[in-house]
Amino acid sequence: MAHEILIVDDEPDIRTLIEGILSDEGYETRQAHNADTAIAAFRQRRPSLVILDIWLQNSRLDGLGILQALHSEEPVVPVIMISGHGTIETAVQAIQQGAYDFIEKPFKSDRLLLIVSRALEAARLRRENSELRLRAGPETDLVGASGPLGQLRASIERVAPTGSRVLITGPAGAGKEVAARMIHARSRRADGPFLVLNCATLNPARFEEELFGVDAGADPIAQPRRAGVLERAHGGTLLLDEVADMPIETQGKIVRALQEQGFERLGGGTRVKVDVRVLSTTNRDLSAEIAAGRFREDLFYRLAVVPLRVPALRERREDVPVLARHFMGRSAETTGMASRELSEDALAAMQAYDWPGNVRELRNLIDWLLIMAPGDARDAIRPDMLPPQVGAAAPAVLKLDRSSEIMTLPLREARELFERQYLEAQLLRFGGNISRTANFVGMERSALHRKLKFLGVQAEDRVAAPAATAP
Ligand SMILES: Nc1ncnc2c1ncn2[C@@H]1O[C@H](COP(=O)(O)OP(=O)(O)OP(=O)(O)O)[C@@H](O)[C@H]1O
């Protein structure tokens, strides 16, 4: 089927010109002239791609605003910005906010067609990649080498065989679901089912039906019996994902179900006895939810028999290289593409970045790099191939070639500047741990201490966390 492209520009001539170029190549097109018509057209039917002018007259939002609105609904549809004279900076900003590329006015038809076909190809690969990832099955092991992750793994190994209920907290994308799958996989229920009930996306009106199931109606063909997740998870594990979003009325019912290891189906009242281990996750502060009257305290104590916390990725930067290589391997395997090396400099830049989206963001970045990074599969990924927000976090020492500051200094000061930046970057990589940093940079611990003091580098001397041990 032909790709359909939405052209958003306030000038009818430009829209007609672009439409002509695209339809000669067999693309279908639609047009919009301002924010409202663009968003309406987008909602009416998702296009394969959007070509979007930055500066629009008589429009509620400019190109950047429209980009944000479209991406909040559908982040995978590629958007190509059209920049006029004086809007290049905005175009660069648009790329930082997720636009695929930009094209400058006046443009040649060949260039437009090239960018369009590349954007469509990249979107196709991304789609295939995530489909393949789903087929490859979810992770059931927390990958990582840092002290905090080692401690978490050790706690999981200890709690998994006990059958206790576990509440897993931590920020979005940090790996809470992976931790839950790991608990199930290492428990005596490993051969039983593992089901996830996402409390955040479920319609509150359908919650109890999903949880407890429904009895057959008077006419069982019209309304057959439907088992809920508690029943289907019998002999296995049920994960209540984002449990803070469970409606308060349902919370009371689940307390009773947990207490009695049984419940009644809706619509008929058949009593069902089940043996299910319940795990739950949340990225909210449940004590604040309890104080605000949105979460039942008795449910909290039932779910949080053992509380576990998955730390944010920026609290365990040592995991970044291990995870990045792991995802590169997995992504290459599932797509059949050749895996790419990640240069030490690129990994150091990635370690310095704060990862607001945590491991999920890192995983998506690796998928993106495998498909989009320029150069041959044999070339290592360098820091300049990283997206701007990640590259910008690179330690100053990696950008020396771009800064002329060092050339204006006498040797002693230049050396000190370099040493300071280099050691700050290494400390960041090793999570502030002096022993590991000293080991890596090839200095005695005490000598490194002295050097840091001399250079005025603040260093928290954290002791290496104990390695993960089995119970
Ligand atoms: N330590 C890890 N090892 C391997 N993969 C991981 C790890 N942590 C996270 N992932 C991967 O990162 C992605 C996000 O992880 P997960 O869904 O477990 O996060 P979450 O904390 O449950 O997020 P949310 O709160 O948004 O549901 C998944 O693709 C998962 O496979």
Image (cartoon, rainbow, N blue to C red):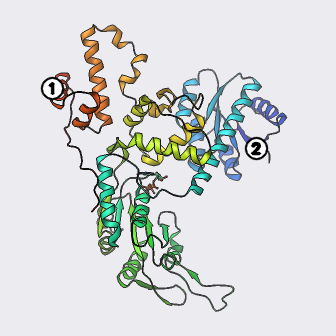
Q: What residue lies at 51% left-to-right and 42% top-to-bottom?
A: 328
The tag on residue 3 is 2
Relative to 336, residue 54 above or below: above
Relative to 55, residue 72 above or below: below
Position in image of residue 162 (x %, y %): 32, 71
User: Looking at the image, which is closer to me, 317 or 31?
Assistant: 317
Relative to 304, residue 109 above or below: above
Question: In the rendered structure, which amino acid carries the disc numbered 2?
Answer: His
Q: What residue lies at 42% left-to-right and 85% top-to-bottom?
A: 262
From the viewer's perspective, tell me whether residue 76 is left or right of residue 238.
Answer: right
Mark 1–mark 2 Cα distance, whole angstroms, equals: 63 Å
Question: In the rendered structure, which amino acid carries the disc numbered 1?
Answer: Arg
Res 355 visible? no
- Location of the C terminus by quadrant is bottom left
Q: What residue lies at 68% left-to-right and 34% top-to-bottom?
A: 118
Q: Quadrant of residue 3 in the image?
A: top right
Q: Give the secondary structure at mark 2.
A: loop
From the viewer's perspective, tell me whether residue 407 is left or right of residue 194.
Answer: left
Q: Quadrant of residue 175 in the image?
A: bottom left
Which residue matches tag 1?
Answer: 450
Res 67 visible? yes
First reached walking from the N terminus: tag 1 or tag 2: 2
